């Protein structure tokens, strides 16, 4: 059966594709990246550091999840050692330098710095690790960008409710204050939260991210409520006490682009409902001129809650003071973007009852003709979607420069990563067109990721790195892929290569490119 499946997938990708022209992010051009446009690369603590219990670090919710649920990760792996960056950070800084990148975005592990979760016990070795990394970057003239929270809550704080406990606003603020005290004079960019929707919707409302609580319909809203207050609190603390550092602070939101599944008013409406209740769930309170949750979400959850006999909406309400306190609390709009979906209105109940999915009531699919042979099944290559999303954000949330804090492509490993080269070329072409033709307000771009790493539930199967990591080697040897060379070339020349063709998607459909990259995975599946 397995074999039949792969033969079919294989045959599918060998097919031609009629709709490719609509995917291009723009025609061939000589556009260049503006003078002050910054290029970066991103990583996250859980995914690269390893040393999960070394030097005083306590377990995070990810350590806890993968140690207690052995089937959670696709290849049964853990993040115990990962790329061993806790010991190899000097090589990491050297790689960022080799790439010619201006900024390195990495995250700090809360349980490494505060093993109890609280500031009663600040771990000197945790502080020293990040201080050494930052100093190493500065030595190369690389600007550090710190993500304060990239999903690794101390398990000890999860035990007392995690993001559903409203006192976490104080706990998180205390933690952030420790980081500002130690590093704000050296770090000029801060991201309070990486993809809060993944934390709350998938982690508390579902099972796809830690803590896999699955209390849908309630916990994702409670989590978001506390998290947005925590974000705003930290922004105000930063502006009150650390403003003289000149640092900039924002949030990184994940968003797919959405296209209507059919050209009907109803499906066009589904697109707007989807965007405003997903990205807008977090963006509207912080980045919209009026603040608060998006009116669509307020109405939808209210109506469903009433129908379900709740006395009040499952979506908590912000007071007028809270709306004002949260509105405008960012210096930039961090965007993580990878792919596009097709949206339609559901004509029956969808998802579990109650849940955010059920409240929102839209259906999301991908066009099977969209190119991709990614190891991440959701990652279809639609550069035009990236361009449209950048324009949408520029119009909808004016006044905030957009920094693309993540964008990238996953494969099953290999140095000759033509698909990743093609993905980056297409998405950077879309970005250039968004800047030059649409006047999108984009000021920076970060590739995800510097190196292969622990891809959450996909373990080490799905590889996003510009550098290949040999996870079997004792030194976790890092080697630049073709895509690293492309990125270096783009940064140095500030334009796409001469031979780039915006209509060429053959790297995602050629059988010859597909077979060698899929082979190890097919063998793995057949043998297990
Ligand atoms: C980012 O998440 C993370 O910040 C990063 O740590 C991670 O390694 C990287 O991207 C690559 O995955 O539920 O059907 O939409 C990406 C955001 C949103 C992408 C959820 C995958 C799952 C498929 N993710 N999506 S679906």
Image (cartoon, helix red, strand yellow):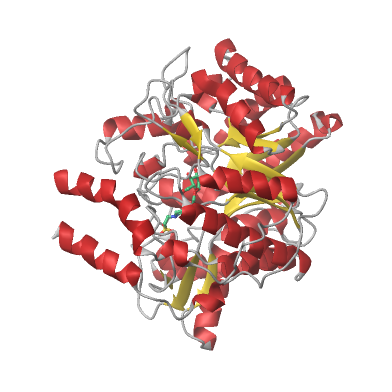
**Relative depth, front residue between 208 and 177:** 208
From the top left corner, tell me how far across and down residue 173 is, in percent. 64, 31
Picture quarter containing residue 193?
top right
Q: Is residue 99 above or below residue 282?
A: above
Picture quarter containing residue 168?
top right
Is 417 situated left or right of 405 in this image? Answer: left
Q: Is residue 403 above or below residue 123?
A: below
**Can the viewer see residue 176?**
yes
**Relative depth, front residue between 124 and 375:** 375
Q: In the displayed orientation, state which residue is furthest to the right.
A: 244
Is 226 situated left or right of 182 in this image? Answer: left
Q: Residue at x 54, y 27 (%)?
A: 110
Q: Residue at x 34, y 43 (%)?
A: 461
From the image, which quarter does the N terminus lie in?
bottom left
Q: Is residue 20 above or below residue 280?
A: below
Q: Residue at x 53, y 38 (%)?
A: 150
Q: In the displayed orientation, state which residue is furthest to the bottom.
A: 264
Q: Is residue 15 above or below residue 279?
A: below
**Can the viewer see residue 153?**
no
**Relative depth, front residue between 359 and 109:** 109
Is 309 situated left or right of 131 in this image? Answer: left
From the top left corner, tell me how far across and down residue 412 is, in percent. 37, 47
From the top left corner, tell me how far across and down residue 79 is, in percent. 39, 30
Image mark count: 0
Q: In the displayed orientation, state which residue is furthest to the front.
A: 499
From the image, which quarter does the C terminus lie in?
top left
From the top left corner, tell me how far across and down residue 413 is, in percent. 39, 44
């Amino acid at each position: 059966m397995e074999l039949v499946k792969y033969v079919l997938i294989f045959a599918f990708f060998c097919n031609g594709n009629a709709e490719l022209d609509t995917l291009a992010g723009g025609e061939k051009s000589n556009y260049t990246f503006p003078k002050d446009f910054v290029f970066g690369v991103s990583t996250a603590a859980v995914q690269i550091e390893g040393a999960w219990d070394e030097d005083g670090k306590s377990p995070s919710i990810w350590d806890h999840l993968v140690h207690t649920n052995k089937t959670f990760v696709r290849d049964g792996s853990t993040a115990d050692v990962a790329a061993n960056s806790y010991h190899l950070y000097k090589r990491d800084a050297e790689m960022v330098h080799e790439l010619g990148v201006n900024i390195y975005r990495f995250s700090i592990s809360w349980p490494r710095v505060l093993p109890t979760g609280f500031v009663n016990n600040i771990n000197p070795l945790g502080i020293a690790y990040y201080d050494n990394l930052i100093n190493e970057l500065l030595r190369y003239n690389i600007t550090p960008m710190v993500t304060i929270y990239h999903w690794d809550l101390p398990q000890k704080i999860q035990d007392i409710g995690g993001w559903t406990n409203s006192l976490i606003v104080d706990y998180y603020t205390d933690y952030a204050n420790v980081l500002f005290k130690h590093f704000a004079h050296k770090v000029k960019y801060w991201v309070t939260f990486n993809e809060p929707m993944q934390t709350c919707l998938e982690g508390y409302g579902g099972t796809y991210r830690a803590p896999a609580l699955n209390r849908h319909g309630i916990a994702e809203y409670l989590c978001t409520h506390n998290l947005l207050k925590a974000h705003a609190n930290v922004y105000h603390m930063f502006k009150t006490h650390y403003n003289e550092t000149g640092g900039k602070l924002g949030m990184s939101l994940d968003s797919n682009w959405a296209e209507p599944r059919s050209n009907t008013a109803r499906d066009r409406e589904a697109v707007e409902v989807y965007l405003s209740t997903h990205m807008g769930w977090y963006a509207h309170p912080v980045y919209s001129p009026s603040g608060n949750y998006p009116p669509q979400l307020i109405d939808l959850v209210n109506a469903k809650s009433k129908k379900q006999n709740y006395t009040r909406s499952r979506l908590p309400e912000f007071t007028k003071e809270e709306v004002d306190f949260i509105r405008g609390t960012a210096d930039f709009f961090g965007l993580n973007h990878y792919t596009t979906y097709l949206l339609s209105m559901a004509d029956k109940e969808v998802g579990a009852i109650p849940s955010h999915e059920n409240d929102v009531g839209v259906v999301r699919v991908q066009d099977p003709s969209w190119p991709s042979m990614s190891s991440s099944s959701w990652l279809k290559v639609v550069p035009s979607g990236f361009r449209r999303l950048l324009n949408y954000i520029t119009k909808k949330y004016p006044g905030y420069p957009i920094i693309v804090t993540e964008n990238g492509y996953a494969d099953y490993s290999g140095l000759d990563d033509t698909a990743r080269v093609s993905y980056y070329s297409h998405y950077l072409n879309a970005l250039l067109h968004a800047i030059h033709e649409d006047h999108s307000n984009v000021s920076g771009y970060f590739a995800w990721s510097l190196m292969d790493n622990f891809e959450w539930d996909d373990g080490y199967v799905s590889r996003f790195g510009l550098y290949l990591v040999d996870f079997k080697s004792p030194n976790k040897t890092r080697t630049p892929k073709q895509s690293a060379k492309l990125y270096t070339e783009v940064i140095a020349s500030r334009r796409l290569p001469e031979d780039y063709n915006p209509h060429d998607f053959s790297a995602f459909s050629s059988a010859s490119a597909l077979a060698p990259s899929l082979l190890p995975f097919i063998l793995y599946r057949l043998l297990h």
